[in-house]
Image (tube, grey):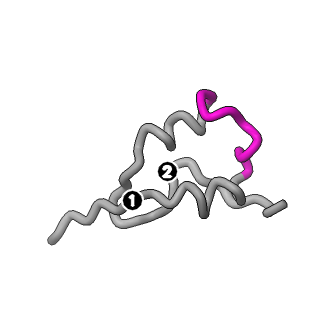
Amino acid sequence: MEIDYQEVYFNDYCKTCIYKNKDEREEPCNECIEQPYVLNSHVPINYKKGEKR
């Protein structure tokens, strides 16, 4: 089994996340930013889909 770490696409996901108005130093955003590569995914670790505005 191959381990496949992929770059997180913050530009695509953060703008639709329910936490998009939080500062990047606040939780849970800071946890996402600390992990720019995720196993088998381009999605940030704490991403929760909200509305795009």
For the C terminus, which image quadrant? bottom right
Kindly report which numbered mark, 1 or 2, lies closer to the viewer in this rendering.
Answer: 1
Mark 1 residue element? strand
Amino acid at pointer 1: Glu
- Is the residue 8 above or below the residue 33 in the image? below
Q: Residues within 10 Å of mark 1 (few under 14, many from 20)?
A: some
**Side of 41 where 30 appears, left or right:** right
Location of mark 2 (residue): 45
Location of mark 1 (residue): 7
Which residue is drawn at the image coordinates 43% and 37% (left, top)? 34
Which residue is drawn at the image coordinates 79% and 63% (left, top)? 52
* Disc 1 from disc 2: Cα separation: 12 Å
Give the tally of numbered discs. Answer: 2
Amino acid at pointer 2: Ile
Q: Which tag, 1 or 2, sits closer to the chain's start?
A: 1
The region drawn magenta spans 18-26
Tell whether position 7 is magenta: no
Please tell me in which quadrant of the rendered image residue 24 appears: top right
Give how far across and how far down residue 14 sits, in percent. Answer: 64, 54
For the N terminus, which image quadrant? bottom left
**Side of 44 where 53 appears, left or right:** right
In this orientation, which residue lies closer to the viewer: 46 or 22? Answer: 22
Tell whether position 22 is magenta: yes
Give how far across and how far down residue 15 sits, in percent. Answer: 70, 56
Mark 2 residue element? loop
From the image, give the main secondary structure of the stretch colored magenta.
loop
In this orientation, which residue lies closer to the viewer: 5 or 10? Answer: 10
Please tell me in which quadrant of the rendered image residue 29 appears: top right
Callout 1 touching callout 2 (CB < 8 Å): no
Give how far across and how far down residue 32 sits, in percent. Answer: 50, 43
**Side of 39 where 46 appears, left or right:** right
- Is the residue 41 above or below the residue 22 in the image? below
